[in-house]
């Protein structure tokens, strides 16, 4: 059965969720306070790059089942309200800024009716849901809160939303828990029918599932990057090492790609917020390793900068360096805490003339770093370069022809910040190939 849903907050998570739920047959109103964003979404234009999203928006808007509004009153009448606002890192601490969650709940209280469900999707410090549930039931007796974390990856967001690898419901006890379960089962009927595993839990577990999943992924990446640091000292090759340990199914090869590390709007801020929350709970030591995970991660960006400058062998101020990639990962235009943008900026700070490019993220990068030079293509960026630094493994960059590129650079030096190139092919074409933790 199809339901009427609202999605509060139409950033990455909310816009994707709204369009995906409409595609599944539900009627959806997306609410956001940003009028420009709402206008663009109503025209079927996502305010960020996500493969397939514009097409899905246009398709579902045409059915009449999806629209966006700045007016909270338009959320009235929905049975399930998804909370999808951001929880960025506070500027003066590592903790999450939950003010948008609080504001969204405040606004929702004006439209909720008894029996309505609020389904929290935002990544929040553990304990938030219990407090919000008290607030909701005090203001609107009979309205219910569930916590329903989201695990979508940028670049795969539509698939991850419509066919997730698991569903998690954090439910209250008793009758309200039963109603929440039934409503969420209707929302996700298609995924459940396809056999998607469902884990039902309490609020705290559901909140912790989300942050611990991201903490684990971050730890896995920093683990392999720590091995890269050791490999560099002893002349070993971290890619072969990852292949070898990855064959053990208990370890697994995914998320073991060493390079310049993780970035984006989630992993970095989530591990910091988790540490901060653990400290509030008196359990700092339980996740003290996350500070090391963060430190290893940031060191790898610096390492790429040092490798580039050493390889060039002249003063950075005399060098022109091409940086390929600005998005925090391929198939995204997101530059939040982007390792690649960080590397480009550090090289600039060291005095180099940096010419950076990216298939999608130039505009976003330019807003943050107007002092970098931007080129439209890899070839334009690489022309006359003293070194080329690959920092985001876009398919286009992986497919670059080392022979053709060799003809346009000044010095054939390639720093492979993502260990994604065929070192042998680049060396055979006359390049000095420098990987991260590779021979
Ligand atoms: C991450 C999680 O993977 C999602 O499950 C989660 O829902 C999301 O955060 C979130 O909390 O919203 P995302 O930020 O889209 O998703 O990006 P990832 O694919 O996890 O990549 C994160 C970073 O790790 C990227 O900078 C990527 O380049 C880097 N990475 C990834 C590596 O350096 N090595 C790897 O082996 C894998």
Image (cartoon, grey):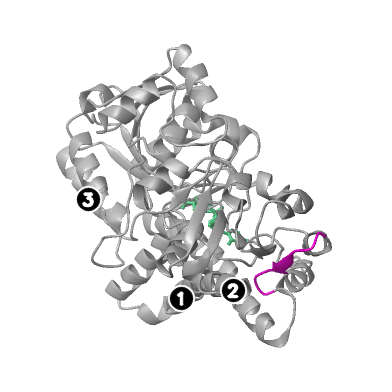
> Magenta residues, as a range?
429-437
User: Judging from the image, what secondary structure is the residue with disc 1 in?
Assistant: helix
Q: Position of residue 302 (x, y in %)?
A: 50, 72
Q: How many marks?
A: 3
- Report how far apart the C-alphas of labels 1 and 3 lie in the structure: 28 Å
Dot 3, crowdedness within 10 Å: few (<14), some or many (≥20)?
Answer: some
* Residue drawn at the location 51% of the way across and 74% of the way down: 315
Q: Quadrant of residue 310?
A: bottom right
What residue is pinned by disc 2? Answer: 307
Splitting the image into 4 quarters, where does residue 83 fall?
Answer: top left
Mark 2: give few (<14), some (14-19) or many (20+) Cα within 10 Å.
some
Question: Looking at the picture, does residue 140 appear above or below residue 215?
Answer: above
The one nearer the camera, 309 or 232, is: 309
Q: Per the image, is 260 magenta?
A: no
Q: Which residue is mark 3?
A: 99
State the residue position of label 1: 295
Q: Nearer the viewer, mark 1 or mark 2?
A: 2
Q: Quadrant of ligand 1?
A: bottom right
The mark that comes first in sequence, 1 or 2, is 1
Distance of mark 1 from mark 2, alpha carbons?
18 Å
Q: Position of residue 274 (x, y in %)?
A: 38, 66
Q: Is residue 399 above or below residue 72?
A: below
Q: Quadrant of the C terminus?
A: bottom right
Q: Residue at x 19, y 47 (%)?
A: 135
**Label 2 secondary element:** helix
Viewer-side label of 1, 3:
1
Nearer to us: label 2 or label 3 = 2
């Amino acid at each position: 059965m199809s339901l009427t849903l609202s999605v509060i907050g139409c950033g990455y998570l909310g816009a994707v969720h709204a369009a995906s739920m409409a595609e599944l047959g539900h009627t959806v109103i997306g609410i956001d306070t940003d009028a420009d964003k709402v206008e663009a979404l109503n025209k079927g234009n996502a305010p960020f790059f996500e493969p397939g999203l514009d097409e899905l928006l246009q398709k579902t808007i045409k059915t009449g089942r999806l629209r966006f509004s700045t007016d909270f009153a338009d959320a009235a009448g929905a049975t399930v309200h998804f909370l999808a606002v951001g929880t960025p890192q506070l500027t003066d601490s590592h903790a999450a800024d939950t003010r948008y969650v609080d504001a969204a709940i405040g606004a929702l209280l004006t439209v909720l009716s008894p029996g309505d469900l609020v389904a929290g999707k935002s990544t929040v410090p553990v304990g938030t849901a219990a407090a919000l549930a008290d607030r909701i039931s005090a203001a609107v007796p009979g309205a219910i809160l569930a916590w329903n974390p989201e695990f979508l990856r940028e670049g795969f967001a539509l698939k991850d939303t419509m066919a997730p690898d698991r569903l998690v419901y954090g439910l209250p006890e008793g009758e309200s828990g039963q109603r929440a379960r039934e409503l969420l089962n209707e929302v996700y009927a298609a995924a459940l029918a396809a056999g998607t595993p469902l884990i039902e839990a309490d609020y705290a577990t559901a909140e912790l599932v989300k942050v611990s999943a991201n903490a684990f992924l971050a730890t896995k990446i920093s683990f392999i990057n720590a091995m890269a640091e050791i490999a560099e000292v002893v002349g070993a090759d971290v890619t072969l090492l990852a292949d070898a340990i990855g064959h053990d199914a208990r370890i697994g090869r995914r998320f073991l790609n060493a390079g310049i590390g993780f970035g984006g709007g989630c992993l970095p801020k989530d591990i910091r917020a988790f540490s901060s929350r653990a400290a509030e709970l008196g359990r700092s030591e339980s996740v003290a390793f996350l500070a090391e995970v963060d430190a290893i991660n940031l060191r790898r960006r610096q390492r790429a900068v040092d490798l580039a400058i050493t390889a060039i062998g002249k003063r950075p101020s005399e060098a022109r360096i091409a940086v390929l990639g600005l998005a925090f990962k391929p198939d995204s235009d997101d530059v939040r805490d982007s390792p690649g943008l960080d590397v480009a900026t550090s090289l600039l700070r060291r005095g180099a003339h940096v010419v950076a490019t990216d298939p999608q993220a130039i505009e976003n990068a330019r807003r943050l770093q107007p002092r970098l030079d931007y080129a439209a293509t890899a070839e334009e960026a690489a022309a006359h370069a003293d070194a080329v630094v690959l920092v985001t493994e876009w398919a286009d960059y992986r497919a670059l022809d080392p022979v053709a590129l060799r003809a346009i650079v000044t010095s054939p030096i390639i720093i492979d910040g993502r260990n994604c190139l065929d070192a042998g092919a680049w060396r055979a074409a006359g390049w000095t190939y420098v990987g991260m933790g590779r021979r």
